[in-house]
Image (cartoon, grey):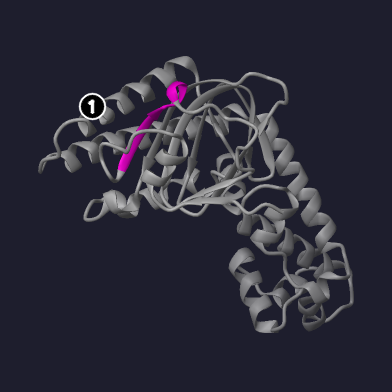
Amino acid sequence: MQQPRRFKTISQFHQFRNRPQPEHPLISIIDVSTARRLNDDEPNSMVFDFYMIALKTIENAKMKYGQQMYDFDSGVMNFTAPGQVMGFSLRKGKVIHQSGWLMLIHPDLFWNTPLAKKIKQYEFFHYAVNEALFVSENEEATLTGIVRNIKQECQKSIDKFTQEIVMAQLETLLAYSDRFYQRQFITRKITHHQLLDKLNDLLDAYFNNEAMTTNGLPTVAFVAGKLNVSPHYLSAMLRSLTGLNTQQHIHLKLIDKAKELLSSTPLTISEIAYALGFEQLQSFSRLFKTKTRVSPLEFRQSFN
């Protein structure tokens, strides 16, 4: 299997695309329409040691985003943090036409600025490998206008105001991106409800399987993997629909199963705790009381 091609610096990527060296060593904005066209020797996947924010339209090409493929025939925005993997798939025999922009930002640019911490809080960087952001023409125009301002500032001579002005523009760009991303959760409610149904079916099957005794409680990572989404994306989607994250959904299903066993079987509380994957009775009792405000014994006695 071919290893991803890694780019440690922005200059290395410029050289790979046969472009002049970046005007600013820590940030670069590339007009995709002037970039070297993708061709048959394109790497299957690439990894950057810097951030990438891109808004592109590419005819006859798909981008691999985690386990999913996305058409680029309309405006698609994607975000990657250092160390994430991405790749392109070309349609054989087709001419590639592309437009849009690509922004590369080295983490060193954020030193001694609020964005050094804040950029890690934007969810789209965490699950960028699983979910693309689709934007309308008006939204694309708004984002492109901000990028144009950043590019103009980087083309000037660097002075003591350069970083402050670029950071302010970047924060605005990320704030708009966050707004559009949260909107996407709303506009995809049908798909998200289908995913919620799959989650419920998955948890029902898991808690009704005797193997749970040896496998233990399902983790957020396990559940997200079974649903082919990232843990961050799943929790964000669930919060937008139900107000609860993935771990809280797991606990709800666990408590429902515990109530069923407490009310309809002669199993002892210790046996129920063990059957539900708990190694310690105290851990089960504490979680049950936290969620129901009564102990497992008090809940059982209420049926007598």
- Total marks shown come to 1
Quadrant of the rendered image containing residue 171? top left
Residue 304 in view: no
Residue 85 image point, x, y percent:
57, 49
Would residue 226 be found to the left or right of residue 174 on screen? right
- In the image, what residue occupies the spot 50% across and 30% down? 183
The residues colored magenta run 27-34
* Rendered view: 302 above or below 137: below
Query: Does the magenta run of residues contain 281?
Result: no
Q: Quadrant of the N terminus?
A: bottom right
Q: What kind of secondary structure does the magenta stretch mostly adopt?
A: strand
Query: Does the magenta run of residues contain 29?
Result: yes
- In the image, what residue occupies the spot 72% across and 21% down? 93
* Rendered view: 270 above or below 17: below
Residue 250 image point, x, y percent:
68, 59
Would residue 290 be found to the left or right of residue 181 on screen? right
Residue 169 image point, x, y percent:
26, 34
Category of crowding for the residue at label 1, using alpha-carbon neighbours closer than 10 angstroms: few (below 14), some (14–19), many (at least 20): few
- In the image, what residue occupies the spot 71% across and 26% down? 91
Mark 1 — residue?
152
